[in-house]
Image: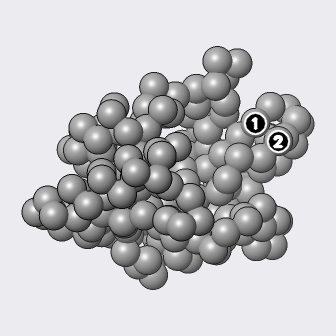
Amino acid sequence: MKYGIALFPSKKLQDFANSFRKRYDPNYALITPHLTLKNAFEASDDEIKLISSRLEEVAEVNQPFLLKVYKFSSFYPVNNVIYLKVSPEKGLMKLHKSLHSGFFNDNTKYAFVPHITIGQNLSDDEHSDVLGQLQMTPFEHHTEEIDRFHLLYQLENGSWTVYETYRLGKNN
C-alpha cells in the first residue's frame, strides 16, 4: 500500500488554499491542503506497524512549532506548481530531518521547500497568468501552531486519508 506523511494546517488556512485549489489543482478532491513531510512510499501491513511505532518516537522528540505562511510562489521553471510558501522554521526543519534520517531513508528527489500546493499541472501561459495575478494580490501573513502530523494512506480511487495521527512533544 502507498503511504505518505503530512501535516494539515487549520481550517482557516485550508479554506484559503482551497479557494484557489478548486480552480487550479486537479488533485483538489483527492487530499485536503497539506504540507508534505515525507513523499509517498510503499509499505506492507507488517512494515507499517514498525514505521508507525518509529513515528511515535519521532513525535515524542519533536515539539510543537509555528507554521508561518507568507507569500505565493512557484517551482517554475522546474515545474508549473504554484504554492503558499512556508517559512523554514527550526521546528519544522527538525521534524522533516527526523523523517529523512536514521530509520527513515531519504526518498526525496528535490530539496525540501516547505509549501502548500494551490495549483499544478498548469500550462506555461496559465501558470504565468495565475502567478502574476496572485503575486499582485495583497497577502496577509498567516501564523499558527502545529502540534501534530499524520501518516496517510492512498485509497484505490487515488484519494488520501489519515491512517494515524501523532502529537508532537512529550506532554501532548
Q: Residue at x 63, y 74 (%)?
A: 111
Q: Earlier in the sequence, mark 2 or mark 1?
A: 1
For the residues labelled 2 and 1, the Cα–Cα distance comes to: 5 Å
Residue 23 at x, y percent in the picture? 33, 33
- The answer to whether 124 is drawn above or below residue 27 in the figure is below
- Quadrant into which the N terminus falls: top right
Can you identify the residue that label 1 sits on? 2
Residue 116 visible in the displayed image: no
Identify which amino acid the numbered label 2 is placed on. Glu
Q: Residue at x 26, y 61 (%)?
A: 132
Can you identify the residue that label 2 sits on? 42
Element class at badge 2? strand
Q: Nearer the viewer, residue 56 or 76?
A: 76
Callouts 2 and 1 close, C-beta under 8 Å:
yes
Q: Residue at x 41, y 78 (%)?
A: 89
As drawn, the residue found furthest toward the top would be 157
In the figure, is residue 156 to the left or right of 65? right
